[in-house]
Amino acid sequence: LIPIKVGAVCRVHFGELREVEALRNCGKAMKRKSTIDDFSRRSGRGPSISAVPFNELSHGKTVHLLSERERAQLAVIASLVRFKKGEQIYGEGNRAEYLYNIIGGVAKTFRSFPDGRKRIMAFLFSDDLVGLAEEGLYVNSAVAVAPVIAYRLPLAGLDHLLRNDPTLEYHLIVKLCHELREAQHHLFVLGRHGALSKVALFIHILERHQESRQENLGEIYVPMSRSDIADYTGMSLEAVSRSFRTLATHRILAFRDRRHVRILDRDRFDGLVSGEGRPHETALP
Amino acid sequence: LIPIKVGAVCRVHFGELREVEALRNCGKAMKRKSTIDDFSRRSGRGPSISAVPFNELSHGKTVHLLSERERAQLAVIASLVRFKKGEQIYGEGNRAEYLYNIIGGVAKTFRSFPDGRKRIMAFLFSDDLVGLAEEGLYVNSAVAVAPVIAYRLPLAGLDHLLRNDPTLEYHLIVKLCHELREAQHHLFVLGRHGALSKVALFIHILERHQESRQENLGEIYVPMSRSDIADYTGMSLEAVSRSFRTLATHRILAFRDRRHVRILDRDRFDGLVSGEGRPHETALP
DNA sequence: CGTAGCCTTGATGGTGATCAAGCCAAGTGG
DNA sequence: CCACTTGGCTTGATCACCATCAAGGCTACG
């Protein structure tokens, strides 16, 4: 039973998840092996959620919240679903029937303005939950940024599980606190004035996120488009582009390609992140 | 036992909470009576939490989440604390030992920049929870904006209660989802370009908040200073002031005094809220 | 009545949004 | 294998908007 599932998932992995693979495959064959193990371990046994706890010390690392038993319980009501890049997972205002647990790929949640603009509320990665609702309706739209694999959990069944399992509920609370903190980080980014500060903080968030999961240290993977970054940071697409270039020409960042950055000058980078990026104070030669 | 508590709370109410009283006392004696009842009902029997549920329909109204029994259970470990206007409830980076349940007044949570600026993450009112932590440390500072009365719940004891009461946990989940949505509304505000849009959306949020609790319809109470609004919306204090004046001179809003607004022109107001407030589109005569 | 905090108003300049081309990379079909 | 297309990204020029600096007013409270 389980071996079959693992096999199936691996096939999917190599077929559709090239971007996910690219994310971790930073040129080292070693990495690739461990990714497969990691991936099949996670997806083969049911839903997976991780978060930085609010009470225990984990030294900035996320911890996996679910026990094997809980994962198995959730797996009973869950079904595995895939979304191609750009495909919609659900739409704002739709009847909320499912909670999604992403186990591979990247998604974004956003709200649209009448004029066609978007405000991206969050980027979501593996071990995240998506599907926030209010009075039975989704409050955001969710779309895959890179091909997504997720468990789809019917809210009805989930409700039943939760009411009978205090530990599972507790884990959900930990995860929600985590998401709340992430939203506050996001607020922090948007509040910052100065384009350089904003993009630096954005990169900083990506870095922290990948560090907390012990993914590819040293180089930061940027899975989303410039235009998504613009919608997330509240800037224009052009401003994002220019800011990246400025940071690159001043040797603060270095781009291997459009989706891989390395931080060259940690001091000046941290200076921007911690707020010294205000316009007239930023006298970059 | 309980009656004594009620008495004590009422005394506190009239002594220190003039602003809270003013909030609801909109010139009608009727209001005042019901406020007292409401207040003593809430504070006399233990902690109180309300939220808009994520699944059931409540037509935009918040519902009280805790049963009498749960409130009594929580009351056992809780102690009632008061904070004067401007007083700190806890500081960013402090050891997180308590969760606070506000039952009267207004508080703000914020993070400070090295240059002394603040980014306000949220305003908190009665029936709200404050004290978000990461790895045992508060992630924000919290300060009373108007005199606050709150229940202080030791995390240790709370943990124990939660693990034994799935329903209580479930209520907490509902509340956290609510807070997450509020944070996303805030993101929406910050993302908007155009000063008029931002302040309109801010007023809109206040209105929705007060409506959802069925407080003083028709007039919106603005308990926080201009400078707090600036820190919340990511604008300068002057820009907030100017925007308010613009909205007032164009008969979209009317201020009874600095803390009470009425929406005069609902159509144009909604226009701003929903994004037509972008600079060059805003041709206000 | 005086002082302090908060708010309003004015003048100015920098910053980033916007409009408008070009560029690069990846995919498609001949 | 090479035109052709498409979508995403970069770059340039212009100007509106708002942050900033700097006074002046209002209110509240001693």
Image: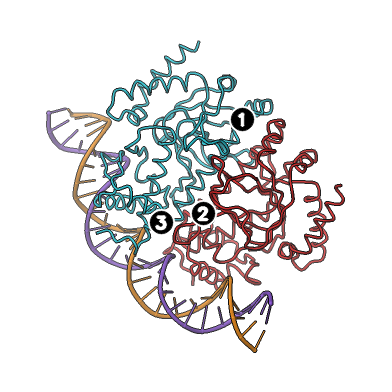
Chain colours: A cyan, B red, C orange, D purple
Which element is circle 2 on? Answer: strand
> What's the chain of the residue with tag 1?
A
Give the amino acid type for the residue marked by disc 2 in the picture.
Answer: Arg
- Disc 1 versus disc 2: distance between alpha carbons? 35 Å
Asked if labels 1 and 3 share a chain, the reply is yes
How many residues crowd mark 1 within 10 Å: few (<14), some (14–19), many (20+)?
A: some
Q: Residue shown at 80%/62% (left/top)? A: B32
Of circles 1 and 3, which is in front? 3
Give the amino acid type for the residue marked by disc 3 in the picture.
Answer: Gly
Q: Are marks 1 and 2 in contact (CB under 8 Å)?
A: no
Give the amino acid type for the residue marked by disc 1 in the picture.
Answer: Leu
Viewer-side residue, B190 vs A217: A217
Q: Residue shown at 24%/51% (left/top)? A: A249
Figure check: B245 above or below B163? below
Which element is circle 3 on? Answer: helix
Residue A216 point in image, percent of width and height: 35, 33
Viewer-side residue, B95 vs B6: B95
Total numbered badges shown on the rendered structure:
3
On the image, numbered disc 2 is attached to which residue?
B111
On the image, numbered disc 1 is attached to which residue?
A155
Q: Are marks 1 and 3 in contact (CB under 8 Å)?
A: no
Residue A55 point in image, percent of width and height: 58, 38
Mark found first going from the N terminus, 1 or 3: 1
Asked if labels 1 and 2 share a chain, the reply is no
- Is residue D1 shown left or right of residue A33? left
Viewer-side residue, A83 vs A168: A168
